[in-house]
Image (cartoon, rainbow, N blue to C red):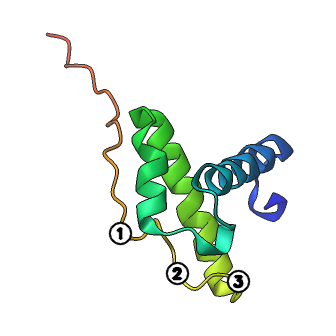
Amino acid sequence: MEAIGRTEETLRTRWYQIVRLSKIVNKSITDVTEDDLIFYLAGMGTEGRCGVRSCVKVFYQWGMRRGLARCNPADSCRTRCATPWNPPHAPT
C-alpha cells in the first residue's frame, strides 16, 4: 500500500480494523459474511462505521482480485455516512 501513498500508520490502522472484525465475529477473515459485518458495525457511531466499512470493502476487493476471497461482505452493506458540512453563504 505504500506504493499508492499509504503511511505505515494507515497500514497498521487498516490491518487492526480487519483483524478486530474477524475476532469480534469469531470467524476467519475469509469466512466473514455481510451479516457479520452488519453486526460489527451496529455498535459503532457514524464516523466509525463509514471508516471500517470502507476499509473492509477495499480489503476484500484486493482479496478477490488475488483469489484470496470469494465475495466482499461490504458490497451490499450500506451505511449512512456523515455528509460534509457546508456553511450557509454570508450575506453580501
Report the residue at 75% width, 45% height from top. 10
Above or below 66: residue 49: above
Q: Nearer the viewer, residue 61 or 30?
A: 30
- On screen, 80 above or below 85? below
Mark 3 in CB contact with mark 2 (< 8 angstroms): no
- Would you identify the image quadrant in which residue 38 lies? bottom left
Residues at marks 3 and 2, CA–CA distance in whole angstroms: 9 Å
Residue 6 in the image: state x and y as whole percent: 76, 52
Amino acid beneath label 3: Leu
Q: Which quarter shows the C terminus?
A: top left
Residue 69, compared with residue 8, is above or below; it is below
When the figure is inspected, residue 65 is found, relative to residue 76, above or below; the finding is below
Near-viewer residue (45 or 58): 45
Q: Which residue is mark 2?
A: 71
- Of mark 2 and mark 1, the one earlier in the sequence is 2
- Dot 2, crowdedness within 10 Å: few (<14), some or many (≥20)? some
**Residue 41 as seen in the image, left or right of residue 6:** left
Asked where in the image residue 85 lies, by quadrant, the reply is top left
> Where does the image place residue 81, in percent across and percent down from the top left?
35, 42
Callout 1 crowding tier (Cα within 10 Å): few <14, some 14–19, many ≥20: few
Query: Element type at marker 3?
Result: loop
Instruction: Residue type at mark 2: give it.
Output: Cys
Earlier-in-chain disc, 3 versus 1? 3
Residue 57 on image: x %, y %: 53, 64
Name the residue rendered at 31%, 45% in the picture. Answer: 80
Secondary-structure class at tag 1 = loop
The residue most toward the left is 91
Mark 3 and 1 residues: CB-CB less than 8 Å, in contact? no
**Position of residue 46 in the picture relative to residue 52 (left or right):** left
Q: What residue is disc 3 on?
A: 68
Task: Identify the residue position indicated by label 1 in the image.
Answer: 76
Which residue sits at x=67%, y=48%? Answer: 20
